[in-house]
């Protein structure tokens, strides 16, 4: 189903930052500097209904989650891949995992499911039919078009 992407249909994007990466290389911080998302350090009450991307979630993100993303926002977790297992114990009401995708970012190029925050957000936005915003996010990175090609978005 191809939905319109008018400027009124832009979900709020957040990056739950665990302070484990170099801010100069972090895709979340870059998107924040471009005013495309807000960096947060905890999930407060106002964000409790947001979709949070967690690779250990029980449910997969789908286009049926579009209204939740639009109404409450989308949160990507930005932490070191060395510490990813710590996310296993976190429980969130609207936690969702992405389907298996291949990274195109320079650090993890060609690796399954080792996406940058920007890749994870763009993927979630494609899945929930926010194509224009997904394309805008990927356009900010030299490898963004390659990510789309590899994963056939």
Image (tube, helix red, strand yellow):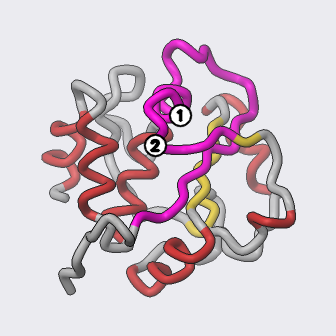
Residue count near mark 1 (Cα–Cα under 10 Å), binned few <14, some 14–19, many ≥20? some
Depth check, front residue: 82 or 71: 71
Q: Is residue 147 visible?
A: yes
Helix, strand or loop at label 1? It is: helix
Q: Position of residue 102 (x, y in %)?
A: 32, 45
What separation in Å lies between label 2 and label 1 (alpha carbons)?
A: 6 Å
**Which quarter of the figure is the C terminus placed in?**
bottom left
Taking 13 as reference, is 119 left or right?
left
The tag on residue 114 is none
| Residue that sits furthest to the front in the current view | 8
User: Magenta stretch: residue 5 in it?
Assistant: no
Residue count near mark 2 (Cα–Cα under 10 Å), binned few <14, some 14–19, many ≥20? some
Taking 63 as reference, is 144 left or right?
left
- Magenta residues (range): 10-39
Q: Position of residue 90 (x, y in %)?
A: 81, 58
Q: Position of residue 128 (x, y in %)?
A: 38, 73
**Which quarter of the figure is the N terminus placed in?**
bottom left
What residue is drawn where x is 64% and y is 74%? 58
Depth check, front residue: 29 or 124: 29
Q: Are marks 2 and 1 in contact (CB under 8 Å)?
A: yes
Quickly name the residue at label 2: 36
Quickly name the residue at label 1: 32
What residue is drawn where x is 18% and y is 46%? 150
What residue is drawn where x is 22% and y is 25%? 142
Depth check, front residue: 111 or 131: 131
Q: Is residue 35 above or below residue 22?
A: below
Q: Position of residue 75 (x, y in %)?
A: 61, 55
């Amino acid at each position: 189903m191809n939905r319109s992407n008018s400027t009124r249909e832009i979900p709020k994007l957040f990056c739950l930052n665990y302070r484990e990466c170099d801010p100069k290389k972090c895709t979340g911080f870059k998107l924040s500097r471009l005013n495309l998302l807000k960096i947060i350090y905890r999930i407060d009450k106002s964000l409790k209904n947001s979709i949070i991307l967690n690779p250990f979630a029980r449910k997969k993100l789908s286009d049926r989650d579009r209204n939740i993303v639009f109404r409450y926002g989308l949160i990507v977790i930005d932490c070191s891949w060395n510490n990813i297992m710590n996310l296993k114990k976190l429980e969130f009401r609207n936690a969702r995992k992405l389907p298996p995708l291949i990274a195109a970012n320079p650090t993890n190029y060609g690796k399954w499911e080792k996406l940058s925050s920007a890749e994870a957000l763009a993927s979630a936005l494609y899945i929930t039919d926010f194509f224009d915003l997904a394309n805008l996010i990927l356009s900010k990175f030299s490898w963004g078009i390659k990510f789309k090609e590899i994963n056939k978005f």
